[in-house]
Amino acid sequence: MKKIFFVACVFSITITAQRVPGPEAIFQQPAFYGNSPASICWSPGDSSVAFIWNKNGYRYGDIWLAQIPSGKLRQLTTFNNENSGNPDQIIGNLSWFPRRQKLLFTYRGDIYTLIPNKQDQPVALTITDSREIAPAVSPDGKYVSFIRDNTLRLIGVKEGREIQLSHTMQGNQHQKTDFYSDSGTIFHYQWSPSGRQIAIPDFVENHARAILIFNLASDNSTVRIVLSKDRQLFVRDMLWSEDEKKLVIDYMTGDLTKRNIVLIDIKSQQIDTLYSRQSELWCNDFGSKLFWTNQEQKILFGDTQNSYQHIFVVDLQHKTPISITRGKWTVFDYAVRAADDQVFFTANKDNHYEKHIYTIDRKNDKVVKVSYKRGCHDFALSSTGQYLIDVFSTASIPPQLYWTRTFPVSKSKPLLIPDARIPNAQHLMTALNKKTRNSKTGNDVHYTLWYPEDHLASEKYPLILFLNEAKKPVSDLYEWEFSNLIAQWISSKGYIVAEIDYPTLPEIPEKIDADRGLEPLEMQLQDIDAVIGLLAKEEFIDVSRIGIWGFGYGGYLSLMALLREPDRFSVGIVIPSENNWERSYSIYERNIFRKIAAADYQLSLNSPDIYSNLRGKLLLIQGVTNPLAPMINAFELTRQMLNIQKRIDFIFYPWEGSQLTSDPTYIDLMHKLLEYFDRFL
C-alpha cells in the first residue's frame, strides 16, 4: 500500500513539474531563484524607494527607483545589465542623503553620488587604488565618512577635501566588511545626531576594547573610553542620545560567553550595565540592533528565550528586561517608528515555512499581522515610518515588492512584480516540506524531501542526506536558492534526497538541556538520526545505501556522522569550503569553530583511533583555504587515513579564498559528486 501511495504521490507532483535542469543550466541561466531586490531604502519624505536589482535575474544588480504612490519604476545605473560574474561589479552601501533627494553608494571600491532627477551619470566622490568601505553621510549632509586602509576619514561633499580622523587601526576593516555584511555582528562607527561627533571602536585585529569619540566641533579632539577589562570585544551596535551626552553600546566578549548592553556617560566616562547575559557555551548573535523608546527612557533589543528569538525592552533606571513578544515566536528582524515607538517585526509562529510582518497595537498590546499572503515576507520601514516595503516570495513565486501604510494597516499595493513566466519556475514544486521529532531532546526537526521522478519502476532507492550550510527556519528567500535545484537534480538521477534543517551553531546553547549534558555535535547528529529513522520505515528506501554530503559546517557534520556511525553510512562527501550560494562565515562563527576545536565536546580528529571507525567511502574536496580549518585539517586527515590504509579519495580545487566562484568549477564539482555516489552507492 505504501508503494502505491508513493508512486501516486510522485506522479501527482511530477505532472506539474518541468524537466529538471542539470548543472550546466543551473549555473549558466540567470539566478532568478535567489536574486531579491536588495539594499531597499526610502528617500527623505517617503517620496520614492531605491533598491539594487537585476531585471534579467543575474547576480549583480543596478540601482532602481520606484516613485510613491504611482509605483513607476526607473533604472538609474547600467553597470550590471549583463552577467559579468565579477565580484568587483557589486554596487553596495546604498543610502540617501539626509533631507535631500540624493543617493550615495559604492562601486568598484570607490564612493559615488547620484541625484536621480538631475544627473544621468553617477559622480565619483573618491577615485583611489584602495578600497573605500562603510561610507555614511553626516547628518548635515556636508561630509561623507568612510574607512580606507584601516583609517577613518571624512571627505567634503562640495570641495572634496579629505580629513583623516583616526590613527591606523590594527585590524582588517576590509575583512570585517566581507564577514559581517550579512550577519550584522560587526559595527563600524556611528555619527551623533547633530553630526558634531563620531564614535568608532578602537579595533585591534578583529576585536576592540575601547571606543574612540572624535569631536569635529573641537578641532577633532579625541576621547578614548575603555569598555571592559576584556581585551577582545565584538562591538555590535551603538546608539547616541539626542543630547549627545550618552552612548548605548551592545557588545559581546571575544569568547562569545557574555553579552552586555551598557550606557556610557561620555563626560564622566561612567559605564552602567543595562543588560547582561552569559552562556557556558556561547551567546546567540541575534538581537544586536538597538532602538530608543519612551523618549529615550528605554532601549529595545532582541535576544533568545526558551530557544525562541524575542524582542525586549529595558528601562534605563530599573534595568529589568521585559519581553515584548512571548511564547513560540521566532523573531527575525525588527524596527521602531521613531514618531510614536510603534514596533514592527518579522517572525514565524504557527508555520515553520512562513514568515510574516507584525506590529503591536499600542492600545491593547496585541500583536497585529501586517502581511496577509501566505509565504515569506521581509520589510523596510520608511523614513517617516508611515509606510513599509514588503518583500514577498513563496516556493513558486519569485521575490516581489509591495508597499503599504503601516498603522492602521492598509491593503498592500504592488511595486515590483517580476515576470512569473520565468523558465523552470515550477521546478520547486517537487520538494516536500516535512518534520519529525528528536525523541531525546523533544525538538522538532524539519527537512525538505525530493523524490526521484523518472525511476518509478525501482523498488528501493538509495538515500542521500544533504547538509548544506545550516539555515534558520524560513531563511530569506530559501525557496529560491541554488541548493534546492542541486538537490532536485541529484534526486532526478535516482536518489531520494533529504536536506535537513539542523540547528545552527548560534541556536545550539538554547536548545541543549544542561541537565542532560548534551554535546552540540551529539545533538545535531541526533537530529540527523531522527530523519533517517523516520525515512527508514518507508519500504521504498534502501537503508543499506545511505550517503551524506555537505558544504562548510555541513561538511564537518557529514564527516562526524561517517566516523561516529560507520555502519549506517555507505558514502560520505566532505567539502569544508564555503560556496557562493550561501553567505560567508562571520568572525563570530569562526570563533565558534575555534571553541569547538579546543573544547572537550567535539569528536577529536587528532587521534588516529578515530579513523579506524571509517567503513564507507570518503571523498574530501579541499580548497586553498578552509574556514573550518580548526575542526577539519583536510591534508592531515588524508595523511592519517592513508597511514592506516583507509579508503579515502581527495580532490583539490584551487578555489581562491576557499570559495567556489566560477561556473565551470561548480559544474565540474557537481558531476564529480554524482559520479562518486553512482560508483559507491
Image (cartoon, rainbow, N blue to C red):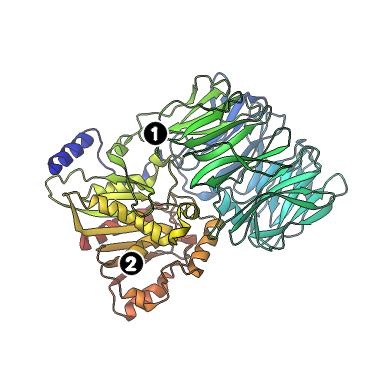
Query: In 3D space, how far apart are the residues under numbered discs 2 and 1 (Cα atoms)?
Result: 37 Å
In the picture of the structure, the residue carrying the numbered disc 1 is: 394
Res 101 visible: yes
Residue at x 15%, y 52% (from the top left corner): 460
Quadrant assignment for the N terminus = top left
Disc 1 residue type?
A: Thr
Disc 2 residue type?
A: Arg
Quarter of the figure with residue 388: top right
Q: Earlier in the sequence, mark 2 or mark 1?
A: 1
Residue at x 41%, y 61% (from the top left corner): 521
Q: How packed is label 2: few (under 14 Cα within 10 Å), some, or many (20 or more)? A: some
**Along the line of sight, which residue is nearer the eye, 196 or 238?**
238
Res 490 visible: no
Vertical placement of residue 602 versus 47, above or below: below
Q: Residue furthest right?
A: 218
**Label number found at residue 564:** 2
Element marked by disc 1: loop
Q: Position of residue 465 (x, y in %)?
A: 30, 54
Element marked by disc 2: helix
Vertical placement of residue 548 versus 28, above or below: below
**Along the line of sight, which residue is nearer the eye, 579 or 264?**
264
**Along the line of sight, which residue is nearer the eye, 617 or 621?**
617
Q: Position of residue 356 (x, y in %)?
A: 47, 32
Q: Position of residue 130 (x, y in %)?
A: 66, 55
